[in-house]
Image: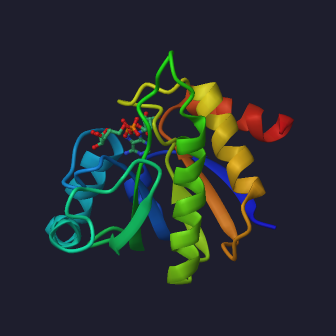
Amino acid sequence: MVRITLVQGDITAEHADAVVNAANSSLLGGGGVDGAIHRRGGPEILEACRALRASHYGSGLPTGRAVATTAGRLPARWVIHTVGPVWSREEDRSALLASCYRESLRVADELGARTVAFPAISTGIYGWPMDDGARIAIETVRATKTAVEEVRFVLFDDAAYRTFATQLASA
Ligand code: AR6
């Protein structure tokens, strides 16, 4: 079974086989984790994303899906880009958020990645409440069959770390 670990910090500093990016459909960058990954990873990542847009993902990467590129200068081998749903009060989009974790692990398996670092997808600019985002993240990783040995959640601040720790203990 996959081992789940938690750390507090900046995901761009993580040494892991693959680092997951909370991207948007354009794959061409943004703020938050996405901005940090492109800034620290250098132009090779954007170049690879542009190539994906020019080939398989002409109209962008759909929400809930995942795709890998080089990690450029990051201390990782690959970046797995996934597009979380924007949080909505009216509509339950949990299945799409769960799909991000599942699809990222499927791509990680294809790559042969054994350690994967995830941010708390959708809980920043996309507005998902942290406690629900943490619950979906942990439940989905636990329920997914994968050859990945360690899933490391990298939480940006102390509040996010504590929320994940509570979910991990109670799930
Ligand atoms: N390392 C780890 N976690 C981080 C970092 C970091 N360097 N920076 C932010 N977080 P977000 P989303 C936390 O906004 O909500 C972009 O513009 C942050 O506190 O990065 O999925 C994309 O292009 C939050 O808990 O992703 C999309 O348009 C979590 O990571 C959109 O934002 C996710 O926050 C995606 O929004």
Q: Which residue is drawn at 57% across and 27% down?
A: 92
Is residue 75 visible from the viewing direction of this image?
no
Quadrant holding the N terminus? bottom right
Provide residue 102's location: percent of width, then percent of height: 60, 58
Q: Which residue is drawn at 33% across and 67% down?
A: 74
Q: Nearer the viewer, residue 15 or 143?
A: 143
**Residue 87 appears left or right of 5:** left
**Residue 25 appears left or right of 97:** left
Q: Which residue is drawn at 27% across and 72% down?
A: 56
Assign ligand 1 to one image quadrant: top left
Provide residue 124's location: percent of width, then percent of height: 41, 31
Query: Where is residue 163, by image quadrant?
Result: top right
Residue lying farthest to the top in this orientation: 89
Q: Which residue is drawn at 47% across and 38% down?
A: 156
Q: Which of 29 and 54 is in front in this view?
A: 54
Provide residue 138's location: percent of width, then percent of height: 70, 46
